[in-house]
Image (cartoon, rainbow, N blue to C red):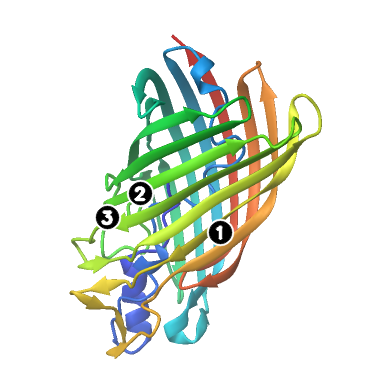
Amino acid sequence: MNPIRATFALQLTLGLACGGALPALATESGVDNIGPGTDGFFVLPLEVDSLPDHMVAFNLYYNHYKARKFNISSLGGELPDVEIESTAVVPRIDYLSPLRVAGGRAGIYIAQPWIKQEVSVFGLHDTREGMGDTTISPIVLWDMGKHLTLAAAVEITVPTGEYSTDRLANTSNNFYTYKPLFSFTWLPTEDTEVSMKSTYSFNRKNKDTDYRSGQIFHFDYSASYRVTDNLRLGLNGYYLKQTTDDKQYGRTVQFAGQDVDDGVRGQVFAIGPALHFTFLKYASAEIRWAKEFDVENRPEGEMLWAKISIPFAF
């Protein structure tokens, strides 16, 4: 469920702009299969043990991301003349079963994004749209009482979108990602809600570029206050920190033949306002915006998410 960022073709463009030196540089390191900020209010349902045996939720996400900055430590900071714009529509189906695993209820979800990607760099421009990479995950939810639900999952992102090394814009990252995940939704009081989803990404190699992005720790967070029975206002955002170096051809990436002292490790923190509205008793809609700060080796921009969720039993 990721808004795809600039990929290997941006690396190629950077290499040409730097006199032919072709580093594996702040391109695939700026790419992830996370989709930071995807999940906001009420990441999990409450009182899951009291829900019907077979529950399905249809979720429809809309994402828009725009960045006019690209921070690359190896170039001394911000890269000029870069604009990245990504729009994604992501249907996701959740299923909660009566099957018990480790005391919790087992389920599964699958997401298939449609993505439009626009990239401009050094006067070059490319646009591409189509189906993105598919994410599927088994999940187990634990009912910890009326005010707390915990969950653990393993997300698997499969490179089913379109990818080409000679394109600036792609709808796939062209590598598999495996993400152990922990999340919770907690009501500290009757009027307040706190949710968080944390992941740790293990990225496989991009077979077309021999580039392997480093491992990434990430979490989405939200906190809301109930203004009326149907309306909540709050804050949301995300944090991402790459923990291992990017590698290409079996070694830590280089720039202009020189070692990169930070391994092109990405980092970003984002925060912004959000609104959550319930209707038809259990259905909900939300809209969330976040601005990115403290960015390293990634695009820096603004993220907008909207979501509609409609659960039903059968």
Q: Which residue is mark 3?
A: 174
Which callout, 1 or 2, points at the residue further toward the start of the chain? 1
Quadrant of residue 205 in the image? Answer: bottom left
Rounded to the nearest angstrom, the CA distance separating label 1 from label 2 is 25 Å
Q: In which quadrant of the rendered image does the N terminus lie?
A: top left
| Disc 3/disc 1 C-alpha distance (Å) | 22 Å
Q: Which residue is mark 2?
A: 179
Residue 193 position, x and y percent, is 68, 37
Q: Quadrant of the C terminus?
A: top left
Q: Quick one: 138 or 294, which is closer to the camera? A: 138
Query: Circle 2 — which element?
Result: strand
Of circles 3 and 1, the one toward us is 3
* Residue position for label 1: 66
Q: Position of 240 compared to 237: left or right?
A: left
Circle 1 residues within 10 Å: few <14, some 14–19, many ≥20: some
Q: Identify the residue shown where x is 45% and y is 77%.
A: 122
Looking at the picture, which amino acid does disc 3 mark? Asn
* Amino acid on which disc 2 is placed: Lys
Kind of residue sitting beneath label 1: Lys
